[in-house]
Image: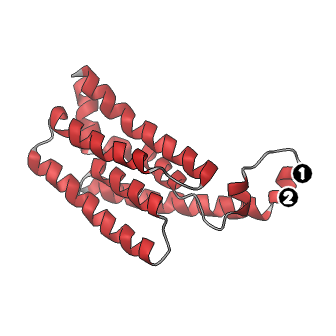
Amino acid sequence: MIVITLAILTILPLCLALAAIFDLVSMTIPNRVSAVILVSFLVLAPLAGLSWPEIGMNLVAGLAVFGACFALFAFNVMGGGDAKLLTATAVWFGFNHSLLVFLVTVGYVGGAVTLAFLLLRSQAESVMAMGIPLPSSLVNAKKIPYGIAIAIAGFLTLELAPIHLLAVKAFQ
């Protein structure tokens, strides 16, 4: 049981951190990161003690988020990697209050990240003149690496996810 608990407590945060780093450096989030998030939930959830109806509702949450993300992607508001990352992460939260808290946090953190990147881009020449190296993807890209916001929001709200609560309870 300790291995399952440790996996629950580490896999999602590690994958979110990787997604944020990839998005920051290359403005892409590899599909395998989102796939690991989704598959690990599907493997760990029944082992952690989530019931099949709960697991089903978590998948419904992912489908609902995917629907909204697909619409945003179709209107070129959200990137495909961001949509897949948000969908896979939503599955860990389930169709309950924790998902709402996570999504609202993504919105607020996303706004802050967007403002920070716009400010950084407007001052890029000054920052680089000070000798601070900036990846070209930050300076030249027209997009905002929203995977960073998704990752930060995931870190801030993960403790509310039902599977995380079960893992923490197993440690006590």
In the displayed structure image, the side of residue 51 where residue 159 appears, left or right = right
Q: Is residue 28 above or below residue 118?
A: above
> What residue is shown with label 2?
125
Which residue corresponds to the image point at 65% horizontal and 68% vertical from the top-left? 142
Which residue corresponds to the image point at 37% horizontal and 70% vertical from the top-left? 70
Q: Secondary structure at mark 2?
A: helix
Direction right: furthest residue: 129
Direction top: furthest residue: 2
Residue 85 locus on image (x, y percent): 41, 54
Q: Secondary structure at mark 1?
A: helix
In the displayed structure image, the side of residue 125 where residue 119 appears, left or right = left
How many neighbours does mark 1 have within 10 angstroms: few (below 14), some (14-19), or many (20 or more)? few
How many neighbours does mark 2 have within 10 angstroms: few (below 14), some (14-19), or many (20 or more)? few
Residue 133 locus on image (x, y percent): 79, 45
CB-based contact (under 8 Å), mark 2 and mark 1: yes
Relative depth, front residue between 22 and 12: 22
Which residue corresponds to the image point at 34% horizontal and 57% vertical from the top-left? 87
Residue 94 locus on image (x, y percent): 24, 53
Q: Amino acid at mark 1?
A: Ala
In the displayed structure image, the side of residue 127 where residue 159 appears, left or right = left
Question: Image quarter for residue 119?
Answer: bottom right
Q: Amino acid at mark 2?
A: Glu
Image quadrant containing the C terminus: top left
Question: Image quarter for residue 97?
Answer: bottom left
Relative depth, front residue between 156 and 147: 147
Question: What mark, if any, has residue 114 been given in the picture?
Answer: none
Whole-number angstrom distance, CA of label 2 to CA of label 1: 6 Å
Question: What mark, if any, has residue 129 been given in the picture?
Answer: 1
State the scheme by which the image is colored: secondary structure
